Image (cartoon, helix red, strand yellow):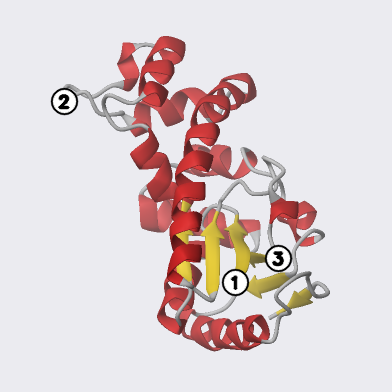
Amino acid sequence: MRHLALTGNIASGKSTVAALLAAHGATIIDADLLAREAVMPGTAALDAIVDRFGPSVLLPDGTLNRPALRRQVFRDPVARDALNAIVHPAVSRLREAQLTAAKARGDAVVISDIPLLFEVGLEQAFDGVILVDAPASQRHARLVRDRGLSHEEAQAMIDAQWPSARKRAGATWIIENDGPPEQLPARVTSLWQRIQALPLHGTTADTSV
């Protein structure tokens, strides 16, 4: 089984690339979905978040108020680190359970979609790392246009992650998502062909797609 990581800064197009890879036959383990599962009502992680950040991060139905929590952590590195220390171990346990199930099924290519892969130092745990990248100006515009964020909110979310240049240096493959949307499927297909040729152990050289 080839176990690869997929990452990319916010609004890079990573989720679209994940969907395209799934269409080619990859098994996707989505860290964002796992993060939601990890903080469902009744979980230890949600209790720890409320203890750290206060009851204002809960909605009336007891679920996590993500916008309220985001406002607290994206402008405060200490708060962000505290949140990561709560959520990441819970997500890791859920990811390992899905990976074990994929191995039992005999899945050939498993891709763990991890937005903060480099920030949390997980890049060495995989047979290769796929980075989806786009210029910061384009990502900023997408956040404002597609998610309705203010310019200040968009910039705060971009600033909360490592700059792309730092991640590009550690990537095995780079998907450039700097053009029109119709270019992306062909680039993902090219990547998939390279993945199919990847040895079962070890990585290849850093290559842009």
Relative to residue 115, is residue 131 drawn left or right? right
Q: Quadrant of residue 3?
A: bottom right
Q: Measure how far apart labels 3 and 2 are at the Cα level.
A: 41 Å
Judge whether 156 appears above or below 186 on screen: above
What residue sits 16% from the left and 25% below the top?
A: 61
Q: Quadrant of the C terminus?
A: bottom right
Q: Please state which of the two labelled residues, at mark 3 or mark 2, is closer to the viewer.
A: 3
Q: Quadrant of residue 51?
A: top left
Judging from the image, what secondary structure is the residue with disc 3 in?
A: loop
Res 127 label: 3
User: Foreground: 124 or 1?
Assistant: 1
124 relative to 187 in the view: left or right: right
Tell me where residue 69 appears, x and y as whole percent.
41, 26
Amino acid beneath label 3: Asp
- Quarter of image, res 198: bottom right
Position of 148 with respect to 76 (left or right) is left
Query: In what element is the residue under mark 1?
Result: loop
- Labelled pair 3, 1 in contact (Cβ < 8 Å): no
Residue 45 locus on image (x, y percent): 41, 25
Measured along the vertical axis of the image, is residue 158 above or below residue 72? below
Give the residue at mark 1: 1
First reached walking from the N terminus: tag 3 or tag 2: 2
| Amino acid on which disc 1 is placed | Met
Q: 22 or 116, which lies in front?
A: 22
Q: Is residue 187 above or below residue 138?
A: below
Residue in the foreground of this view, choosing between 164 and 115: 115
Residue 149 appears in the picture as rendered: no
Earlier in the chain: of badge 2 and badge 1, it is 1
- The CA span between labels 2 and 1 is 41 Å
| Crowdedness near tag 2: few (<14), some (14–19) or many (≥20) residues, C-alpha within 10 Å | few
Residue picked out by circle 2: 61
